[in-house]
Amino acid sequence: MTVMSPEPVTKHPAINPRRRVYRPNSKYIPILATLALLVAMYLGGVGNYRNFDQPSVVVNLFRDNAVLLVVAVGMTFVIITGGIDLSVGAVISLTTTLTATLLQGGWPPLLVLPLVLLIGALLGAGMGAVIHYFKVEPFIATLAGLFLARGLALFINQESIPIRDKIWTTLSDMRIPLGEHTRTTPTAITALTVVLIAAAVLAWTRFGRNVYAIGGSADSALLMGLPVARTRIAVYTVSGFCAALGGVLFTINSTSGHALQGTGTELDAIASCVIGGVLLTGGAGYVVGSLLGVLVYGMIGTIINFQGDLNSAWTRIVVGVLLFGFIVLQRLVTRRTR
Amino acid sequence: MTILKNRLFWPAAILLALLIVNVFTSNQFITLQDGHLFGTLIDILRGSAPLILVALGMTLVISTGGIDLSVGSVMAISGAVACLLIKDLGNQNAVGSVLLIMAIAIAVSAVLGLWNGALVAIVGVQPIIATLILMVAGRGLAQLVTDGQIINVQSGPYATIATGFFLTLPVAFLIAMAAVALITVLTRRTALGLLLESVGGSPSASRLAGIRAKRITVMVYVVCGAFAGLAGLIYSANIKSADSIYAGNLIELDAILAVVIGGTALIGGRFSILGTVLGAILIQTLQVTVVSIGVPSKATLLFKAVVVVVLCLSQSATFREKVFGRFKVRASARTEVPA
């Protein structure tokens, strides 16, 4: 190590040394914007509705959106590499159907769980391999995956299948106390754990750096000697695994499986990532951003629930309007920094 | 070998194979009956009209590097508006009024397209997200228009656009072909196609070259919306009612698929109208074939997946090279190019 020079050389000397306004690193601006708007929504809810300030409102966000959260984490990896995964909703439906069917058929639950997770991961790996080796566009390869997974799910069973397994029902009924009047579920804990692991992997591991490098420029990454093939297949595997895990969480939450479950989840997950500042062109974004994106989605739903007098048509419209307002606001906030 | 190299060869070959299957499985493949053509082939052409229209608009949007997820919702709104207005007519069989109502429904759809285009071009939202908003909210709007009910109409002229025949051919297919002809002339006989591809290739470069990139972007979304609206009219005329939940459900994926089968790259910058039409007819044929050979309808998606995989792989030059290239003598050393 050389001795550090006492005066660090700054690239851009301050034009006005008296000006000391705090400026966050520009790469965090989208996340901070999302966070600020999330807080604003929450405060708006607290101001307008009774009992909105209960801690359970926030805690339940994680339980109600556990599936979307896990899926969005996998999607974050894929989008950062510049890809997209449309198959996640179908993988959820395949997982719920398969889990419910196998459990109904008397398979041991401790075999079913790893099996369905493995199938999700393998499906993802397959799509990743097709995308990388045969240069099929991710949109199309995963669209084929969508048709395949949902086709399989419908083929296995079109009905809603109840789950009577002991482990599943126990997990479904289990509540973990967090404080007075505040309890959460194992699914929420699992989802949060997945978020933390994923955030750590993306921030601090070599794999995480490779993911960003491919998203920045796959050609440069290859020339730098990074394992592009392995990384690209791995992110789709992660996404497939996360989708399958989301499906499992769904079967635990609802103790049933249904082939039409998870329709449209892929778009919710993509929207969550984008709201959280993950660029669809790749190379930028954080798991925490996607977490915030999912929370915004959940908060929209919570506010609509608290409002209470909206029929299903209005619910869709309000979600659309809020999504619009949110995206435009974020767009305005982030544009100013360029 | 040159015909094998054409990117439409494989889709066309698969379409032909499916049609041959249909010749053997269907009772009547094509016959003349009651003064018009009749049979499975005509059913396929008639049924593919909405998808052709939607995919046509989608082709233009994709050629500028965008994507429109809201087409299904626009279809639902258009059908809902038309059926609501027709139901209030004193005489539902008045041709003039029905035509006016259809024009209104298409205009509404075009306005929805304008909304998408403005979000993409002026606000600068990523197309997939910008159109996601209308995809989510649009079905709610359609439900509001129909008040959550299914509106039935008994209008002869309206039904004609879906089930009628003209010059022995189904009217729906003729409408779709007219749209295809219009777009083909506009894009290939004028500079418009070049401008579209230029905007898709690089919006900023084309703006610097003096092309009004934003205006063109807005325009393609308007056209896409209008075509989706027209498709929605045909769909709702076919079932003589407005169904805000199922009209155009998941059609955006089929349309994107049709576009890609037709050889248009999703990143924009080039497009093939003929390819899209071929792709749309192929998808419709596949759906008809699966049912006609007696496969339970729940396996349709599985079939679709298989065909998508086969098509994608056969269109992938890399796949052909890696799998079939082994049988040929390598002319030159291949360099590894990252995707």
Image (cartoon, grey):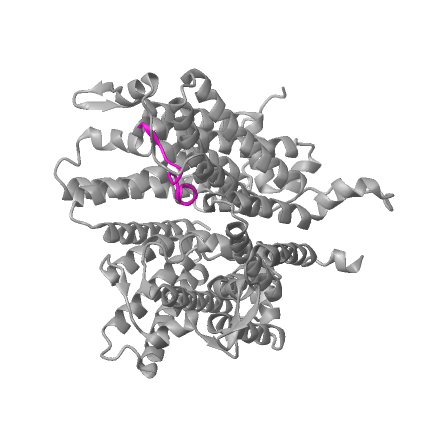
Hey, which quadrant is residue A50 in on the image?
top left
Q: Between residues B219 and A19, which one lies in front from this camera angle? A: B219
Q: Residue at x 85, y 44 (%)?
A: B328
Hey, which quadrant is residue B6 in on the image?
bottom right
Q: Residue at x 58, y 24 (%)?
A: A4
> In the figure, B101 relative to A259: above or below?
below
Residue A45 is situated, as x and y percent measured from the top left of the image, at 19, 42
Look at the image and give the residue range highlighted in magenta. A255-273
Q: Is residue B96 left or right of residue B29?
A: left
- The answer to if A33 sits in the magenta stretch is no
- Quadrant of image for the N terminus of chain A: top right
> In the figure, B111 relative to A40: above or below?
below
- Residue A18 can be seen in this image: no
Hey, which quadrant is residue A158 in on the image?
top left
Q: Residue at x 47, y 74 (%)?
A: B171
- Residue B275 can be seen in this image: yes
